[in-house]
Image: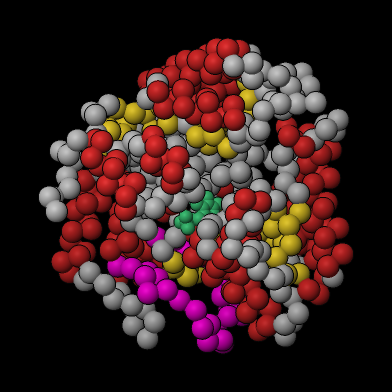
Amino acid sequence: MPAITNHMPTAELQALDSAHHMHPFTNGDELAAKGARVITRAKGVYLTDSEGVEILDGMAGLWCVNIGYGRDELAEVAARQMRELPYYNTFFQTTHVPAIALASKIAELAPGDLNHVFFAAGGSEANDTNIRMVRTYWDAKGKPDKKIIISRKNAYHGSSMGSASLGGMAGMHAQGGMPIPDIHHINQPDWWAEGGDMTPEAFGLARAQELEAAIQDLGEDRVAAFIAEPVQGAGGVIVAPDSYWPEIQRICDKYEILLIADEVITGFGRTGNWFGCQTLNIRPDIMTIAKGLSSGYQPVGGSVVSDEVAKTLGGVEFNHGYTYSGHPVAAAVALENLRILEEEGIVDRVRAETAPYLAEKWHSLGDHPLVGETRIVGMMASLALTPDKASRAKFASDPGTVGYICRERCFANNLIMRHVGDRMVISPPLVITKAEIDTLIDRARRALDECHAQLRERDLLKMAS
Ligand SMILES: *Cc1c(COP(=O)(O)O)cnc(C)c1O
């Protein structure tokens, strides 16, 4: 077989890709017919494809490349660490400096008494850890019946059996026998799609109170924890009404159930603070972290745990761990990423300058005929597409038809913006400049115009009845 390199013609790479590579969350036949776009390199906020075209990455990869692409420092650290100690485990009464240093740094950055880290290779693994950890915690407290974890419909917590069961994605639950037992889902705080005639504030309160109703229904003595993303990401960048989180916190406190904040996207500066729970004023007992922890340069994640939870688990042998928990190369790279985020003031700049600038531009898209609500927190934002703003109507076509067309128009205009159903979402690298934000908005507007023209031509502007 010839060497497969960047210099191969795109069509040959695409053919080999479809012959041998199974893509996540993809219909393989459809992709094979069309050919995947081959990404060959990246720098800053721009990707380059195998045809030499530059694409503005409005998604920071998969919500993760917070410091942007092409930072040599991380490559240097990885090479140095691989030469010194490429791998060792932390299972059998051994440890190593990268794991010690990264756990210490995370404890310093994390709010309150979240001072302990159990490492994983990503968010799914970390949430699987959380399921077992909270149940083991209640066992250790002498309350072994507290097993149920309450989550939300349309939440995303990962793709393993445990984490996808925690998640509330109907399409995922339909495949492979999910959810696992003792996971319960309440409704999400998506006012635009589900708020009906209520004000956002009344709706946010009502959705939070579903947690209280569920606890009373299931029995306080059987509920272990509530898990939620501070801002739903993969579900469509759903920002809860202001009334939601204070009520959730009140309920968790009242019934003494553990609050798990899944900060896989919202952590490490995405919302303009180090963690989303700081932006939203919540006090989790456990935070799930991954993605921005290493800016995606290495696969690493974990559970950040409060003093109280760690102390309770201290006397238990927790029969759980991953070969790559605390992997030294991943840990060293993550530490260097955190150094850059901190020393270059990237999180502060997001909060003070670039996120407010993006917010102003993003809201300006609200005057487009296709755009209903515009939502943004820090550097994650969404647009709800609608055939009629006043009534918040849905399209008559299958959900996602219009979003897909819009995403294709973005792709054609060299902008990566994702669609979730008929919502468009962005989550750009945190280092995006004001000039690059202008480019992003220009391309988004052009894509919206082209999408609108197509919908008119194809008679897809009809409202669902
Ligand atoms: C991406 C994501 C996960 C899963 O992380 P992986 O690293 O893909 O396993 C979990 N929770 C949230 C909120 C995510 O966005």
Tell me: residue 163, above or below residue 59: below
Magenta segment includes 93? no
User: Measured from the top left, where is residue 74 in percent x and y?
Assistant: 25, 51
User: Measured from the top left, where is residue 259 in percent x and y?
Assistant: 67, 61
- Residue that appears at 41% across and 50% down: 23
Tell me: residue 5, above or below residue 407: below
Which residues lie in the magenta part? Answer: 300-328
Picture mark count: 0
405 lies left or right of 209? left
The answer to whether residue 331 is seen in the rendering is yes
- Foreground pick, 85 / 275: 85
Identify the image quadrant of the C terminus. top right
- Residue that appears at 83% across and 67% down: 218
The answer to whether residue 263 is seen in the rendering is no
185 lies left or right of 321? right
Tell me: residue 167, above or below residue 375: below
User: Measured from the top left, where is residue 404 in percent x and y?
Assistant: 53, 30
- Colour scheme in the image? secondary structure
339 lies left or right of 444? left
Magenta segment includes 307? yes
